[in-house]
Amino acid sequence: MANYTKRDEVAVIELNNPPVNALSFEVRSGLQNALKSAIDDQDVKCIVIHGKGKNFSAGADIKEFGAGTKQQKPWITDACRLADESSKPVVAAIAGTALGGGLEVALFCHYRIGTPSCRVGFPEVQIGILPGAGGTQRLPRLIGVNSSIDMITSGRHVMAEEAMKLGILDKIVTEDIIEEGVKFAKSVVGLDLAHRILKNRKIEAVSPKVFDDEISRVKKKYKGYIAPLFCLKAIQASVQLPYDASMEQELQLFQHLVGSNQAKAQQYAFFAERTSARWQLPTGANSQNASPLPVKTAGVIGAGTMGAGIALCLITSGIPTVLVEQDQKFLEKGIKTMEGDLRGSVALKKMTAEQAKKAMLILKPSVNFEDLHDVDLVIEAVYENLALKKEIFAKLDKICQPQTILCTNTSSLDIDMIAEATKRMDKVVGTHFFAPAYIMKLQENVYGKNTSAETVATVMALGRRIRKVPVLVGTCESFAANRMLHPYVTEALYLVEEGASPYEVDQVLEDFGMPMGMFRVSDLSGLDIGYKVRREAAKRQGIDLTLGTRFVNGERVCLLADVLVEKGRLGIKSGKGWYNYGSPGKKEAIPDPEVLDIIEEHCRKFGIKKQKISSQEILERMQLALINEGFRILEEGIVSKPEDIDVIWIYGFGWPKYMGGPMFYANEMKLKNVYRKICDFHQKYPFSIHWTPSKLLARLSETDLPISNWTSLINSNSKL
Ligand code: CAA
């Protein structure tokens, strides 16, 4: 709803729908009625609109967007049209965020003022739609076509200072937004409003070439996403058509997107991220009843690629950090990497040179473990070796304060075994970052059997603070993310053995929307890493792994990647892997006939008959293998809800948001189809354990219930 009060001759309208004042039907109706009252009231000379609480408004209520449904009247434009027609000045007083429809309301006002910490933006592309209440028509009239294209197609938030420069804000005021709004509104009473009404403003002439160029840019930058392209069409309409006609065009484009599968998937992903932040431990402790400990300072052990990246996340979020390496030379190398990454961020305008400098000032590089004595939390990021990690944790346990939380960035080792090296098992937890740690948003937090709720709350809160997307998972071999990767990678290798080329496999995945095919990703990570992990695991199990091994414990294995490693093809770092890169470190991946010969030779050696494999089969086998594993992870309680898995794949491996994540994808395919196909593959490939159908999937597939019901079904029926 919207509250209506008066202060002298000023009408104050408060958008009231906590926590973010989403513009639900009630708020739109309330706003419309309040504007009407203010305009009709002879004593009112001017009007201020503000939001209750911390935010102006986060825009339309996303929950109201059922695919294909029309918005219930009044729509935002109906409610705000009164402001356009008002002879009394209307001022938007913005604190917190004015996003999407929230900014559109503000653009219907004659003036906009904001607090120094406020943010404005059109993030609609991130939920698969476009600003459908005049945003694509009014913003270009205010700040020009080019800046509008940038803001609307990127969805980025614009801070107060930039909003002022662009002309979105007329004034930056103090944080006391209602007082400031009233004062400002009084100061503009009696001024001519004609030029303040955006629909009356002339729009600059822009050649069609600008839009052609933008279409190419957007197609490349937001590959696969349709919303940014629709935004361009709507903005182009603002240039080509009279206001009323282009508003109609915007509405049509908006309605088309609202009903699209991409919008459905992206909106699911939006809420999945928030659902995933609500964690729960098997003990019943959860995000509602556990409080995080304060993290004022942190430490990172290891200045390699991961350690340096994690330290960078901490210092750029304002957390003073001690970075410890055992060797001065490695420490300096790590610092150079960090400085290089910061320079990159400055070049990309993600931060100012001043901010980058400030971040480095709170980094304390050290070769002395004792410097971690007073930090609140330590993240260990040395290489994957259990003995080494245990030694480090035993040492940390002695050096650090008793309340200090000890985190490990292990991607596969047992958290409980690492914790056993300390006398504070409740304060040991996994914080698994993804490479490159400074860029990738996923933070897979892993609890052990003794990790306390307070410790979990602390690392979950830390994740959000350092702009990551934290997900909580339980302990198992490789945890949730990499465990699901295993059948995906394995299937890719089987496909290559059976007749698909690595380049076909990658193409299918990239056409689906993955940022990189599996083989390109392997080259980027380095094929030698998997090689070492496989050999260490085999050694632990007493297995003699050689290039001639075809089965381990009755399970089919394909060691083609190891063949490449033994030929010196380690991936990008050696200039050759599954692809040829010309020279080490170069990024352009060129298909290599030599690799095809190696595969040919491998198949001849083992008598494997090659056949043509269709793109559909490639896609199905890779995706259903990981989806089946996802259901097993859910079944075992490693994650507590399907949204966790989707968030992991979106933010850890680049699953396209417009496909919602693997669990959402399975939901869209219908579980009975997914289950049937997995059973078929299980029959066809009996020696691949990953095709054993998940029991949970089998049970859920009988219910035909949508993904939103799975969690309660799992919780209410333990037999599932
Ligand atoms: N509609 C419905 N619910 C919303 C919402 C919206 N527009 N924005 C946020 N929420 C809900 C969240 O789901 C969350 O709910 P739970 O507590 O139940 O999980 C709650 O509000 C708080 O949100 P966050 O946890 O995200 O809080 P935050 O402080 O971290 O972030 C925010 C605040 C920056 C506003 C962020 O919520 C956000 O980006 N919201 C979406 C903004 C957006 O996409 N707006 C466009 C809407 S579409 C539109 O407006 C179309 C148009 O043209 C009219």
Image (spheres, rainbow, N blue to C red):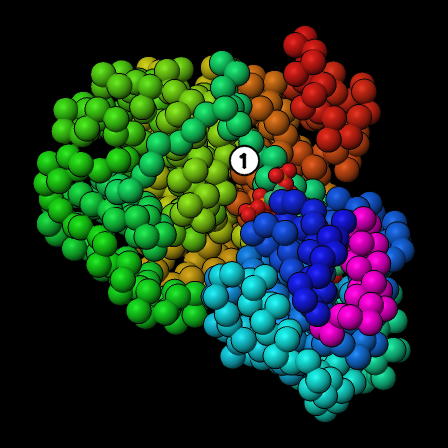
**Which residue is found at the position 33% from the left and 36% from the top?**
294
**Which residue is found at the position 76% from the left and 87% from the top?**
194
Given residues 63 and 79, the one toward you in this image is: 79
Residue 286 place in picture, x, y as percent: 51, 24
Q: Quadrant of residue 307?
A: top left
**Hey, what amino acid is under mark 1?**
Ala
- The answer to whether residue 29 is left or right of residue 699 is right
Establish whether ligand 1 lies closer than 8 Å to the Cβ of label 1. Answer: yes
**Which residue is found at the position 68% from the left and 8% from the top?**
719
- The answer to whether residue 316 is left or right of residue 390 is right
Given residues 193 and 161, the one toward you in this image is: 193
Does the magenta segment cover residue 599? no
Residue 629 place in picture, x, y as percent: 59, 26
Does the magenta segment cover residue 37? yes
Q: Is residue 503 visible?
A: no
The residue pinned by badge 1 equals: 277
What secondary structure is marked by label 1?
A: helix
Residue 22 place in picture, x, y as percent: 70, 51
Magenta-colored segment: predominant secondary structure: helix
- The answer to whether residue 653 is left or right of residue 262 is left
Q: Quadrant of residue 171?
A: bottom right
Magenta residues?
22-46
When the figure is inspected, residue 11 is found, relative to residue 414, above or below; the finding is: below
The image quadrant where one finds the C terminus is top right
Given residues 19 and 155, the one toward you in this image is: 19
